[in-house]
Amino acid sequence: MSKLISFSKQALLLALPIVATCLYPLITLAAVNRLEIPTDIMLMPAGIATLFAVAAGIALACIRKVETGRFAAMLLSAFILFTFAFRDLVVGPSVLVAYFFDGAHAETVGTYLWLGFALLGTLLAVLLRKHIQKAFGAFTAISIALMLIPLVTTPWKDALKTANYAAYMQNITSGNKDDRPVHTLGAAKDLIKKKSTRTAVATDAELPDLQIVILDAYGRDDVIKSYYGYDNQPFIKVLESKGFSVAKRSHANYTQTVLSVASMLNFRPVDQLKKSTDVDLAGVVTNTVDSAILWQILRKQGHKIISIPSGTNLTAMPSADLTFASTENIIMSYQVETALRLLIERTPLSLLSLIDETGVRTHRQQLRDVFRFWEMSTELAEPKATFVHVLAPHPPFVFDENGGPVQPNGRTFTLLDGKKLVEQIGKAKYQTAYVAQLKAINSKVLTAIEAIDAKPHRDTITVIIGDHGPRMNLDWESAKGTDMDEVKGTLMAVRMPEKYKAAIGDIDKCSPLTLLHRIATKVYNAPLEPVSDFSYYSSLNEPFDFVPIANPTGRTDDPAPKKP
């Protein structure tokens, strides 16, 4: 019994520095990104790391010489730290080395440097092992201190709201017994008949349906031509031939999807919507998108609310009367994908091609399904408002110009865009891939409209808009590094019954917020206060630190917006 106790103590002692060095990069990652990645997402890798460390400690405790086991534990711990410090220790210096040698690729140089440092460090450790073995206690103390510093100094209370939100989003994505997503017209008809309108008021059968179709990162035609060298006028002309009015000076209210959608559906700037307890975008989704003022207005008129998400939880609406979802029933988790990407980028694995085939196929299929569901939703006889989010032409670029499958450029499957993606694939590839996916989306939009027009349906107001413009030149860290002319210019196309056109008026200079405000007040008779237009940039890490975008419409006679 005493031998077992002694062995267990030795195994735990050897496991301590390994546990600390395994958890250190995970805790640091969770701390730095606590407002973007729910902390509970890191629990699984933390558990796996702990089990690995304990198993390693048990294995090393089997070595007869205690000093040898301790040396091996320190060597393994140092290797783990060195692996996750790859980007900091190697890539920066390798860029400098590559600069002085023509034709040298920084990442290739970095790989050789890292391998060289690893071999040299191992050799020195072996030569100095007798001295190193004596420093086991100090090494363990330093390892534990490294782990505890971010754990103790980080304001984790902020992150708890994000962690709680993960459970909320799980309820959205998995559905429940009474309100599960559907993927067939028959199931949709059965479910929507069972759903009573939330507010019991008499339905005005004369009021039209409303369709809001968000084409993520779809730019205005002049923006696309200027930044991507593609003339999108043929698509615009076809839309106009089908009865759409297309704005020439439309602009985004915000440069991020959640902020843009929250403001347009609630007719206010986000800083007037968010609660004091909201520390990240999760709270905005919870408090404003799902329970938006627009949905409340339409429910009072007897309309059902239909949600057609595009595979992410950014615009999910759990209280919708009906949600369409892909037959694969896989909702891609942006937070999980981000955490995985950030972990990989810290290691030499970032140099390998690690495209997630399953993620790519699922994302591509979900985009196809969104258009199918859009067509399908118009066949429902009930008065309704349909919110469609198409996560394209936004990256990842999974379609060629004919709608055929292509692999995204880059090392991992990611929703990343802006200059961070340009750093991976280059500006020329970004431009080419964006235009190809834009053409594919154009074709899918027109096909859906033709299919809808070919079948009987209720009078409908259809709004097709970009939540923000393309973001090739977006700097996620700084407004100064962002080309605002690119990110603010968005597509806006509207089709409505003739009798409402005079009331809605000219949409040429509208933003999504001002357009939907007009529709709510002029068509659905909502008693809303007048709104002022605006356009803001905010960074990824400080989403509520808004920087006004001057001259958002692109006209020289438009004054810079005032911050509400």
Image: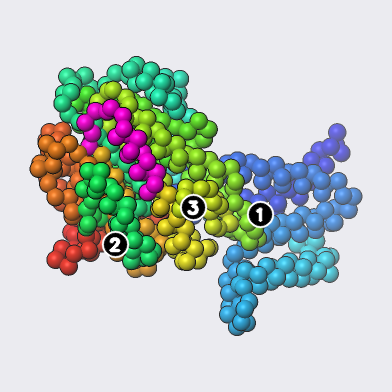
> Residue at coordinates 21% horizontally, 19% vertically from top-left?
200
Circle 3/circle 1 CB separation < 8 Å: no
| Disc 1 crowd, CA 10 A, few/some/many (<14, 14-19, 20+) | many
Badge 1 element = helix
Name the foreground residue: 96 vs 57.
Answer: 96
The residue beneath circle 3 is 400
> Residue at coordinates 64% horizontally, 41% vertically from top-left?
47
Amino acid residing under circle 2? Asp
Q: Label 2, label 1: how many angstroms apart (C-alpha)?
A: 52 Å
Amino acid residing under circle 3? Asp
Residue 447 highlighted magenta (yes or no): yes
302 displayed left or right of 180: left
The residue beneath circle 1 is 21
Q: Which residues are magenta?
A: 442-461
> Residue at coordinates 40% horizontally, 24% vertically from top-left?
185
Residue 362 appears at what percent x and percent y?
Answer: 53, 40
Examine the rendered structure and indicate whether residue 277 appears above or below residue 99.
Answer: above
Badge 2 element = helix
Q: Label 3, label 1: how many angstroms apart (C-alpha)?
A: 44 Å
Earlier-in-chain disc, 3 versus 1 = 1
Q: Quadrant of residue 475?
A: bottom left
Any part of residue 315 in sight? no
| Disc 2 crowd, CA 10 A, few/some/many (<14, 14-19, 20+) | many
Examine the rendered structure and indicate whether residue 468 appears above or below residue 295.
Answer: below
Amino acid residing under circle 1? Thr
Asked which colour scheme the image uses, the reply is rainbow
Q: Residue furthest left?
A: 502
Q: Quadrant of residue 104?
A: bottom right
Badge 3 element = loop
Residue 508 appears at what percent x and percent y?
Answer: 18, 54
Examine the rendered structure and indicate whether residue 453 appears above or below residue 471.
Answer: above
